Amino acid sequence: MRLTMRLVLTAAFAAAVFGALTAVTASAFHPLFLTQSKRELLVLGLGGLWIERAEKAGAVGEFACEKVLIHGWVSHDSPLIHRLLLTFHGKCGLSVPAINEHKKCTEPITTKLILGELGLASSTVHTVLILLIPASGTEFYKAECEGNKITVGGAIIGEIPEINAKGQNQYNKKIAETETVFAVESTKPQVQELQTIWLLGVQMGSNIKLTAAEFFGGNTSWEFAFTTHGAGGMEICTH
């Protein structure tokens, strides 16, 4: 019963992102969150510099804040994290150096509720990824910078690396903190590095992208990392 419910939730999640359900079978494998309490777990986190990049007047612009706060709930024995909020703050600013444009932004900037799901890099590469989408609608956040508005929506994929920045293994054992990384392409930083995810037994990726509107236009990217903590710890299970 628990597996069936988990797959139903996963199918509904995929429908929200891709607009259509993919056939699901009991053999479909997902990495799972396992909490020590075996109950829903509140996770809190902190990240450093967050940078969003997109094009403006043919040039690459940046929207950046010094810190990110994370607040969400992990479901036990499930790939899902829900009621997730990201709050960007600390000298938030908008700049397009090529056209000498620099703006201060109203803080804090808090996303709408986000839903996340664990997946894999591919059917054979079991690096754990996480897909984030707005819990309802298509919008992640709105921000204002000296009269200039930014609206960002869509979906984004990050990685929960097997070995974190401290050299610690993050898979298949109870750990006190979990590192998640959102990276961009080295030669084109306004493009997200991860654009596909193995979900529901299918490699998905045609529509997984962030989009910016108003001040920016077209695709955008997020570059940052954060560490989350939960009382009693949890496990990222890949078995």
Image: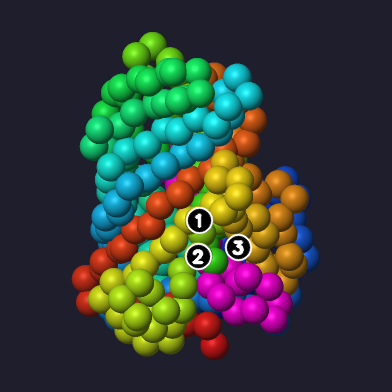
Residue at 27% across, 37% down = 89
Q: Earlier in the sequence, mark 2 or mark 1?
A: 2
**Which residues fall within the magenta stretch?**
112-128
- Up the image or down, 198 lies above or below 184; here it is below
Question: Residue 119, located in which quarter of the rendered image?
Answer: bottom right
Q: Is residue 101 left or right of residue 186?
A: left
Q: Which residue is mark 2?
A: 159
Q: Which mark is residue 104?
A: none
| Residue type at the position of mark 3 | Thr
| Residue type at the position of mark 1 | Ala
Residue 211 visible (yes or no): yes
Q: Earlier in the sequence, mark 3 or mark 2?
A: 3
Question: Residue 6, located in which quarter of the rendered image?
Answer: bottom right
Which quadrant does the C terminus fall into? bottom right
Image coordinates for residue 77, horizontal then vertical, percent: 45, 76
Crowd around label 3: few <14 · some 14–19 · many ≥20 (10 Å): many
Magenta region includes residue 71 = no
Q: Which residue is mark 1?
A: 183
Q: Which mark is residue 10?
A: 3
